[in-house]
Amino acid sequence: MKKGILFLFISCHFFASSQLDTVPVLSYQDFIDIVKKEHPYARKAELKINEGDATLLYAKGSFDPKLHTKIDQKYFKNDQYYSLINGGLKIPTWFGIEVQGGYEQNQGVFRNPENSTPNSGLLHAGISMPIGKGLLIDKRRAELKKARLFQQVSEMERQIILNELVFNAGTSYWKWFKAYNKLMVYTDAQRLAQERFEAVKLGARIGDRPDIDTLEAGIQLQNRMLGLQQSELELKNATALLSIFLWADGIVPLELAEETVPISMDNAQIMGLRTPPFMQIDSLVSAHPELNQSRYKIDQLEIDRRLKKNQLLPLFNLKYNPITENIGGESLMNFSSNNYTWGLEFQMPVFLRKERGALKLAELKIQDSNLELENKQEIVRYKVISARNQWQTTKQQIELYAQTVKDANNLLEGERRLFDIGESSLFMVNSREVGFIKTQLTFIELLTQNRQAELRVLYAIGKAF
């Protein structure tokens, strides 16, 4: 069922036609597109953006206007001891000032004299403003700034997850590519060994070949069969590894159809001929998502440091509220500057040890994070340089070894012709054939290393996805 789902899903959207238009070919880019669209970790990466948006929304909530109402009443033996009604609206602002207004109406036989209001009640409006601590920054503004930075951190986290996912998926694809092409080499080698064994056996039967050639051809056939079986095992394991990256809708695991093959050697070589965009190392390293994530986190720590520094200031809050009686709905007509409430709050620790200690800890965290960032940046630079060097070296080796494969094939063909006319031995043919097989396998290894090296560079600079 899983294989059927995968065949239908991919054949309709992602499979290219092979040379014979019968074998489905899964190209590297099509495979990566499937992974980026369908893998659960790709879906998880997108959730990071939602997490950043939700965090920002939560922080903005601290600046939401707030309606409040409080009613306290007491009745005893048919007397209204008191009725205290107080309601209003508070509006926090970005500048630390809080605008507020409301209505107060207090009645009752035994109400507290300080709560006395006219029967129509009192309207009040005014501001509360910090003059010392909280004037330039407070916890509410700090959390909002950090939430905005967290959005950027979340985007970097999304890129890190995708970068890791595509790197692991891409590595598994090239392992599959390598295993498949090794199997093709051993399949062809086993077929040729089988044909030669049959021909030598027939020649020995009619007296054209010595019997010892039959023994040598049989041993060579057995060796080729062992190599074929080992390559079949490697392909099965590589296919199983590739399949763990294949999903539908992020919830349904799929399996790769058995008849599916990777891109051809020629197409893989063409991919390697282009120069990847990783020559400007310094600029690329500085844009790595992990490094940017660390920088945003340092910015968050800097906000904490500013907040801690602000705590060294004394608490000095001023509140002023003009009040007026509401008579016949004409409250402004009765306004007087002589009617108001005001308050002043002052507080300051004598030694400020707690505040100074908190500031010092915040500064130490920033220093520690900066040192870690410098070290991480050098590690990333090394990884980029190392992978780039491997890419450049393997690219040169591929260009050189392509001729070696041709030369080994020409030697083998020449030795076969000599063998067919009786001027060479089976030992020499087998020796040339073993050499040709080794050159093919080495070329496949170099080509795979080159493709993986490019992927490793892109991963090192955070651009694999």
Image: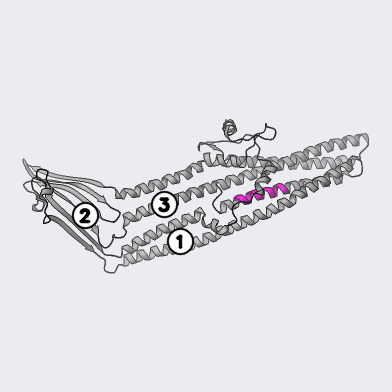
Point out the residue furthest to the front here: 333
Residue bearing the label numbered 1: 369
Front position among marks 3 and 2: 2
**Residue 452 x, y percent position in the rendering:** 63, 49
Residue 64 is labelled as: none
Residue bearing the label numbered 2: 127
Q: Is residue 136 above or below residue 117?
A: below
Q: CA distance from mark 3 to mark 1?
A: 16 Å
**Residue 412 x, y percent position in the rendering:** 83, 45
Residue type, mark 2 in image: Ile
**Residue 331 x, y percent position in the rendering:** 12, 47
Q: Is residue 344 above or below residue 152?
A: below
Q: Residues within 10 Å of mark 2 (few under 14, many from 20)?
A: some
Residue type, mark 3 in image: Phe
Do the residues bearing badges 3 and 1 touch, measured as CB atoms within 8 Å?
no
Residue bearing the label numbered 3: 150
Q: Residue at x 57, y 48 (%)?
A: 167
Q: Which residues are magenta?
A: 442-455
Does residue 230 show up?
no
